[in-house]
Amino acid sequence: MKNILKTMLVVCTLYTNVLYAKNIELSATVISDNEKYITSRFMGFIKTVNVAEGDIVKKGQTLYAIDSTEIDSKKRQATLSVQMYENQYETMNRNYERYKRLYTKGLVSKFEMEQLELGTTNLANMVKISKLQVQEVKNQYKYLTIKAPNDGVIVQKSIKAGEMAIPGMPALVLSDLSSLKIKTEISEGDLKNIYIGQKASVKIPSMNLTTQGEIVAIIPSSNPMTHSFTIKLSFQKSENIYPGMYATVLIQAK
């Protein structure tokens, strides 16, 4: 009788272990796979900020604007340069035309005429260059109004009106709600039991949502502290799902 009970206990234990080995349950988080750090191209004082954290924005919507004082000054300088070179060109060109007439009469040397011709050509080129510089400055105005590159939600705001916008420093963080993924970590020992394209059950308890997911990425870089690997899953989305929500993942091991 004791032997029968021992045998039954071993069988139950093995059966339980087999069931446990076939299921990997993981804690996870909803993330945006298209999160953008919004920054400005030019330095300047922030004139207006039109969004707050949590705001849902549309592509092309104005997020914030930078004061144009500095570029206005550059535009005035560039415009003055155009006027200066145009005036110099007109004067030089009149002298050149006069010297050409005098040269035909033998009253001036060829060298003098050629020097004026060269000066006229150089000034004509400077007029063209200065006009291009004016256009370049005008093009900079469009970078003073920072717009949303895509639909999304503002998840972080680190600027206020009146502060200095610094190129390269993130002012806003925009998360694309159309590109949500589930992110979790799996232990090194379970890595052999998963693969790209593998199906999984995804649950978001706060929204009472249970849906199907699929492993789309296994990041080949282990966390040295936990010896775990990051994986990402796509899932069937529904409304009111946002980055940062808690989720669980149940994977049927291969």
Image: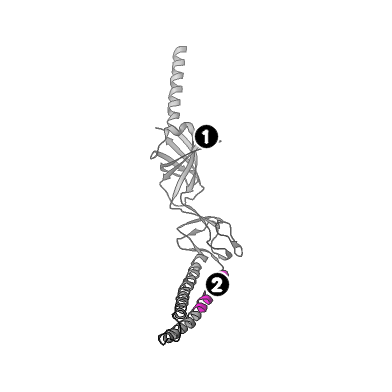
Question: Does residue 157 belong to the magenta stretch?
Answer: no
The magenta segment: 70-85
Task: Check the image and name the residue furthest to the left.
Answer: 197
- Tell which of 164 and 135 is nearer to you: 135
Image point 48% across, 46% down: which residue? 30
Residue 73 magenta-drawn?
yes
Q: Earlier in the sequence, mark 2 or mark 1?
A: 2
- In the image, residue 103 above or below residue 200: below
Q: CA distance from mark 2 to mark 1?
A: 56 Å
Q: Is residue 67 above or below residue 224?
A: below
Badge 1 local density, few (<14 within 10 Å), some, or many (20+)?
A: few
> Which label sits on residue 227?
1
User: From the viewer's perspective, is 193 left or right of 227?
Assistant: left
State the residue in front, 75 or 236.
Answer: 75
Q: Position of residue 23 (x, y in %)?
A: 44, 33
Q: Amino acid at mark 1?
A: His
Q: Main secondary structure of the magenta part?
A: helix
Image quarter in which the C terminus is found? top left
Give the quadrant of the N terminus.
top left
Is the C-beta separation of discs 2 and 1 under 8 Å? no
Q: How is the image coloured?
A: one colour
Q: Which element type, helix, strand or loop, lies under badge 1?
A: loop
Residue 156, position as x, y percentages in the image: 55, 54
Choose between 119 and 183: the one closer to the eye. 119
Q: Nearer the viewer, mark 2 or mark 1?
A: 2
Figure disc tally = 2
Relative to 7, is 254 above or below? below
Mark number displayed over residue 72: 2
Q: Disc 2 on helix, strand or loop?
A: helix
Q: Position of residue 56 (x, y in %)?
A: 49, 58
Amino acid type, callout 2: Asp
Disc 2: CA contacts within 10 A as few (<14), some (14-19) or many (>=20): some
